[in-house]
Amino acid sequence: MGLTQDLARYCTQMKFSQLPDEVVDRVKYLFLDFIGVACRGSQEDSSRYMFQFIRERGKGERGGVIVGTKNRAPFVYAALANGTSSHAIEMDDVNNESSLHPGVVVFSSALATGEMVGANGKRFIEAVVTGYEVMVRLGKALGPANSYSRGFHPTATCGTFGSSVVASRMMDLRADKMVNAMGIAGSQAAGSMEYLAQGAWTKRFHAGWAAHSGMIAALLSERGFRGPTSIIEGRDGFLHAYSDGADPGKVLAGIGSGFEILRTSIKPYACCRYMQPPIDAILNIVKENDLRPDQVERVRLGLLRAGAGLIAEPKEKKYHPQTIVDAQFSMPFGAAVAILYRKAGLQEFQLSKIRSEEVGEMMKRVEFSINPDLDQNFPKQWGATAGILTKDGKRYFKKIEYPKGDPENPLSWKEMIEKFNDLTHRYLIKERRLKIIGEVKELDRIQSLRKWSSLLMRDR
């Protein structure tokens, strides 16, 4: 047996009855987060263009829901739509050690496939847990820095495998069929980081395409189409092709003794996760000391080396964002809005703020550099430092080890519900939101996702 086959065997054998209560609760918690970001993300221009494309492919009453809209689509296209929209606003979950976004891929695939086969809530939960296991373990084995240096977005590449496993579980495929699905998925794994060059929308597309491709892989495997059974570990397999420093041992290390879904972080701010520790530090200083923006002379940030290429380089571009995507990956912009508005949510990451002279002037006061001390605990710890010098000569300093949303510093269920309501209140009436929250908390009692899923559609 090789890595691919061992991983598939583990994923097919995992049962709901074996899952600890905290894992089941975490699936529900993260599913509510996914619904919120997908609903709000469905309103973005990038999502609307995707939906237009999908409408032209055909639609039907038996199709899958597109969360936050009044539309349905053929199931594989529903996964594409929801994956793309849920990744659009940069508020979806992140696994730090693998530096990828599992929820937008896993839940998009699980929901669409679950609707397709009429699966119940318990099977949905099983599939989601296995999807997180596969995506995160492959991401850790590749090494985040290795993925980025090769120009690959790990959410996209690892996500295709994760989706193939999710869809296979939802379709109740045998282990050999899941292996084939993973083998087919390996020839679809893609996702270029070049979106950073022009602030393009393709990063959003990555999550949708991974969910879509994984479903196709499982459907092909079900029909007898064959893929390589050594797609992960083979000479020309995933780990060797997508990384210059992969560690195959991390694929199965400790499997069954813990669950990767418990090690996944939530984003409170509408930007790249690498920007969130410095923003946390800035907000801590500004709020604790009641600093006004006009008091700030200089801001100095210490950053992780692994994230610098995304949020701090090239400097000229980061100080002059032109699009919302640019701003979502600009550390000077994130720091500036945090100081000016004491927030870094969707209202701050807008074109009006990008074009604001006030924001532009504050960005000029922001400096940053790589702090080697922070790298010592990466990727288990995504730290940052912030120092603020005021015009009257006072100095303030804060180091963040675990930013808000990390498992060590989590959002409570109450805070998660507040985030969900904030993202969806314009599109779903209060009664609908309360019903979604209540039924997600009882997810394991749902008898048919096909009947239940219409609850996630827009009601106004």
Image (cartoon, helix red, strand yellow):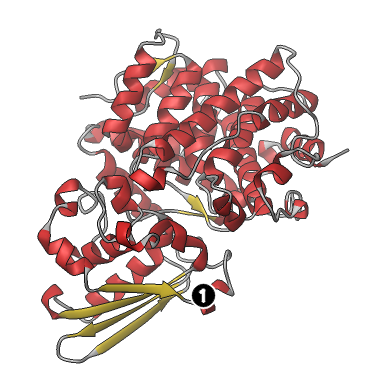
Q: Specify whether 312 is left or right of 110.
A: left
- x%, y% of residue 419? 31, 49
- x%, y% of residue 390? 19, 85
> Which image quadrant: the C terminus?
top left
Q: Which residue is mark 1?
A: 374
Vertical relation: 229 (above or below) 89: above
Q: How many marks?
A: 1
Residue at 29%, 37% (x, y): give it. 40
Q: Quadrant of residue 173?
A: top right
Identity, as a three-letter code, of the amino acid under mark 1: Leu
Most distant residue in the right direction: 1
Residue at 36%, 37% (x, y): give it. 201
Vertical relation: 392 (above or below) 118: below
Taking depth in this image into account, of 404 and 184 the one nearest to the observer is 184
- x%, y% of residue 260? 62, 51
Taking depth in this image into account, of 180 and 13 the one nearest to the observer is 180
Does residue 126 appear in this view? no
Q: Specify whether 358 is left or right of 61.
A: left
> Which structural element holds mark 1?
helix
Most distant residue in the bottom direction: 393
Vertical relation: 255 (above or below) 79: below
Residue at 74%, 39% (x, y): give it. 232
- x%, y% of residue 456? 36, 27
> Which image quadrant: the N terminus?
top right
Residue at 61%, 54% (x, y): give it. 146
Taking depth in this image into account, of 162 and 365 the one nearest to the observer is 365
Q: Residues within 10 Å of mark 1 (few under 14, many from 20)?
A: many
